[in-house]
Image (cartoon, rainbow, N blue to C red):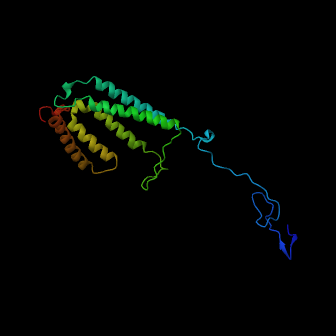
């Protein structure tokens, strides 16, 4: 490759890379060899589809179950639950249940097309850290305890424990202040339902006092 070729009146060097695969000699010295280039797949090419996230079908199933439950339960409601409600007690459960079913259908279609959830990229979120199952378990236990004891202890007591306990579990260590704020919120919501909507919540052991 160090040979010299004559070009009219002068002698010039042949480029060292002339004739190599994937390169073109600008001075046309050496062989021109074409190289294979990997091109991105066309939009209609089905051979490079993204894998489906099957876990999203589980979310679809949950949405369908909750939506059907709301619709069936709404059909069994009567006006005796809220006589002062001009639209009746069925409207909002039907709207929410229908919306959940539509979301389930839209999510299923997006999943079949290969759509995937992008990971959170916020500055205050560490996407590499594992899930905090202890916190999740404590919150689930708190909700289950509220459902099981709300008829016995009443909404005011269980509501205060729910709000204050959730704030403490999520990291706020001022548990006394959390309980006081929870008690205020439960009292306000209790009388808001009773006076504003005509729907009495469970008073529990405080029946006759509230």
Count of all numbered marks drawn on residues in the image: 0
Is residue 116 shown left or right of residue 145? Answer: right
Residue 190: image quadrant is top left
For the N terminus, the image quarter is: bottom right
**In the image, is residue 187 above or below residue 125?**
above
Seen from the viewer's position, the closer of residues 183 and 62 is 62
Question: Which residue is pictured at 52% across the width and 35% down the height?
Answer: 112
For the C terminus, the image quarter is: top left
Residue 105: image quadrant is top left
Residue 59: image quadrant is top left
Seen from the viewer's position, the closer of residues 106 and 67 is 106
Question: Which residue is pictured at 30% across the width and 31% down the height?
Answer: 93
**In the image, is residue 73 above or below residue 171?**
above
Residue 22 x, y percent position in the rendering: 75, 57
Residue 95 x, y percent position in the rendering: 31, 32
**In the image, is residue 26 above or below residue 75?**
below
**In the image, is residue 59 above or below residue 80?**
below
Residue 177 x, y percent position in the rendering: 23, 50
Question: Which residue is pictured at 61% across the width and 45% down the height?
Answer: 42
Residue 4 x, y percent position in the rendering: 87, 71
Question: Which residue is pictured at 33% across the width and 45% down the height?
Answer: 169
Which residue reaches farthest left?
208
């Amino acid at each position: 490759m160090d040979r010299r070729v004559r070009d009219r009146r002068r002698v010039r060097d042949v480029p060292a890379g002339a004739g190599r695969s994937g390169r073109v000699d600008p001075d046309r010295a050496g062989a021109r060899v074409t190289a294979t280039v990997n091109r991105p797949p066309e939009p209609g090419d089905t051979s490079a589809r993204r894998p489906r996230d099957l876990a999203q079908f589980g979310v679809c199933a949950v949405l369908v179950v909750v939506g059907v439950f709301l619709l069936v339960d709404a059909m069994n409601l009567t006006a005796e639950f809220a006589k002062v409600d001009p639209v009746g007690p069925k409207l909002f459960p039907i709207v929410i249940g229908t919306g959940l079913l539509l979301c389930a259908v839209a999510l299923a279609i997006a999943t079949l097309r290969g759509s995937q959830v992008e990971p959170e990229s916020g500055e205050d979120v560490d996407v590499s850290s594992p899930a905090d199952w202890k916190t999740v378990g404590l919150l689930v236990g708190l909700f289950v305890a509220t459902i099981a004891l709300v008829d016995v202890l009443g909404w005011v007591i269980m509501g205060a424990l729910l709000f204050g306990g959730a704030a403490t579990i999520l990291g706020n260590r001022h548990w006394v202040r959390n309980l006081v704020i929870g008690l205020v919120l439960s009292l306000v919501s209790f009388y808001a339902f009773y006076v504003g909507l005509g729907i009495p919540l469970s008073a529990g052991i405080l029946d006759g006092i509230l």
